[in-house]
Amino acid sequence: MQTTILAFNANNQLAIRRAGASAGVSAPANAAALPFTAPDLPAALAQLETHFKTHTAPVPCFTFPLDGNETQVYLAQVSPDDAAPAAPEIQFASIDTLVGASLATPSVAPSAANQGVASDAPTSALQPFSLSALSALLPRLAPHLIDIPYLHLGENDFIYKFRPDKERNRLIYQPDAAARALYQSRLCAAIKTLARASERTAAAPVTLDFGAVRYLIPSHFGFCLGVKNAIERAYETLAENPDRRVFMLSELIHNPYVNEDLRRRGLRYLQTDKGVPILATGLRTPASDTRSPESGVQSPATATLWDTLTPDDIVIIPAFGATDEDKRRLVRKGLPVVQYDATCMLVEKVWKAARAFGREGYTIIIHGKHEHEETKATFSNARRHAPALIVRNLAEARLLTDIMHAAPPPQTQAPAAAAPVLSSPVGGVHAAALSSCSRGVHAASASPPASTPAPTPQQLFDRHFAGRHTPNFDIARDLQRIAVVNQTTLLMNETLDIIEHLRSAYAAKYGPAEADARVGGNARRDTLCYATQVNQDALSRALAEPLDAAIVIGGKNSSNTYQLYRLCEQRLGPRAFFIQSEENIRTLDAIEHYHFPAHAPRHESAALSDNTELKPLATPARLAEKNTPLRLLITGGASCPDGIIQQVITRINSHLPPATLRPIESILADLEK
Ligand code: SF4
């Protein structure tokens, strides 16, 4: 057994030995391309340290045969800044470059061998060595590219911590008039100063008394620290790299106005919020296009922006985080991941909780929407440590426990002898299917159906949760012990209801004494986002006041905005509105209200395209009433800039007689008293 350390620089490019340089040890020719190869780890480490004094501890990864010797592969990150004088013989190349070079035969002419070699790999670095070692190694390495350790980032560290207030870069919000209109609001700034004694505790709402209309603004609304952090990173990266292409993996946040302002300043997006790659031409690829990035060179007509990436580019990871698959693609391209990773630390906290649960032997149940970027990233992280499953809501949690009750004992895959009892009335086809399944188990012992046997609980699980669980998920084995984490932006009570339901279902199956041990997920590892929670709490306090209507502002694909809207809808029914900006306020009789999700009922006569409908802000009689001011609640989701909130207020005021309104300066004076 020999040892090789694969050393990567901060750009995730692999150290290889320059052509013609001596290996310095009696390594066979193929191994010479891998410069830190020796009979054992201490010797390989000594080689590494002749070139790089600063490096992470090597992480054992896998074994593979190199020149006939079984070789243990370690991964490490090095700091090239302190390279020793002998360093020129060591050069760095991206994995894609090496794959391209290793596909070329060593005997071909240099010009031919250079095809597919990107700028990060000088031809001389790859010739005349036989690259067969790399050919064998690189496919084995591919799944482990996510395991490269990072200097200055321990397992329990956060990629990026919220900046303290005094270190935040507020200049990025005011480079020009467009940005100022988007991000700045004197009203919102005054409200926050007045109402937010604590970032984490909701206080009483603030009233803006304009005369004919009174706005009630919750103490907490709008940008959370995770969103501010991602926005500031994006603007700073653009400003610091005027000569480089800067991409965002997908939308920075779920707000079209913020995303558009960044696009105007040069930021480009690699894929849509649904993960569909964007073509190099700027068009979107058909959703059916499922080519993998490894599928080879694309024609110019179908090449995606992913295909055009080079190590000179920058790709920012948004606040939702990224899947391991996308991070591996970045590593293959020789691009840094951590340096431009704006994953919110509260999302990362969920990943850490999932990892801890996984290590304790729990299966991870993720309460979230499987199509949401954050949930995809959380699932991708969780599956590294344990079997994982995404559950959308309480109804699905009930279906899951029905399946759990019907599952055979572990390692006994024979049909259950007794009919499982359905613990809850789950609506829809799947409950009916499960119900017929359990009846089918009964019937099977007496007279098996001739042609269409009832599906087994495992088949029902596979059918209902298709695409939302780890491969080979075995309901008998993998539902023995479960722990719940969640998408950060959902309603806290719904996650707690799910945990409560799971506990009682497990108590029914295993006895109350065992339920706590079998169902993890509690305040100790609370994975709800406090910013989401405090916005919801502040809104609930405001909703307790007398109101004519409530308007929630945010991007159409913003999950946390939708949750705020749901709270308003529960209290005010059709007098709750979900809008994106002041542009949705045509008149007070015609507000463009967005339905999220799209299947919500609406009035056909007033329906517009894009799942919106026109609704009046209040009844005609109420709008005509002159003596009592309109009482409107206004709030914004975590991705809604303050400027838009103020513009909504301004637009509503513009539809009221000016003589009935107090000037904004007078409102500000009230707030600043
Ligand atoms: S809503 Fe919460 S989890 Fe999401 S970005 Fe903001 S602070 Fe982070």
Image (tube, helix red, strand yellow):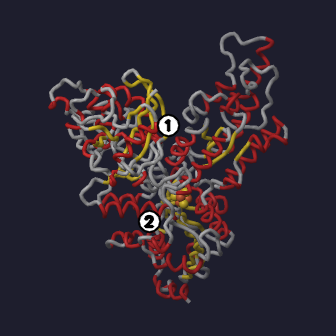
Q: Which residue is mark 2?
A: 586
Residue 12 located left or right of residue 441: left
Residue 613, x across and y down, in percent: 50, 55
What is the quadrant of the C terminus in the image?
bottom right
Q: Nearer the viewer, residue 568 or 601?
A: 568
Query: Where does the image place residue 7, in percent across and percent down from the top left?
Result: 38, 42
Label 2: element kind: strand
Residue 396 lies in quadrant: top right
Q: How many angstroms separate mark 2 from mark 1 (CA)?
A: 62 Å
Q: Amino acid at mark 2?
A: Arg
- Residue pointed to by mark 1: 60
Would you say residue 116 is visible in this rendering?
yes
- In this rendering, the answer to whether 574 lies above or below 141 is below
Q: Amino acid at mark 1?
A: Pro
The answer to whether 137 appears left or right of 206 in the picture is left
Mark 2 within 8 Å of ligand 1, using the beta carbon: no
Using residue 309 as the reference point, say whether residue 592 is left or right of it: right
Give the structural element (helix, strand or loop) at label 1: strand
Q: Nearer the viewer, residue 606 or 653?
A: 653
Q: Find residue 296 and report its horizontal and vertical position in percent.
A: 30, 30
Going from the N terminus, do you reach mark 2 or mark 1 first? Answer: 1
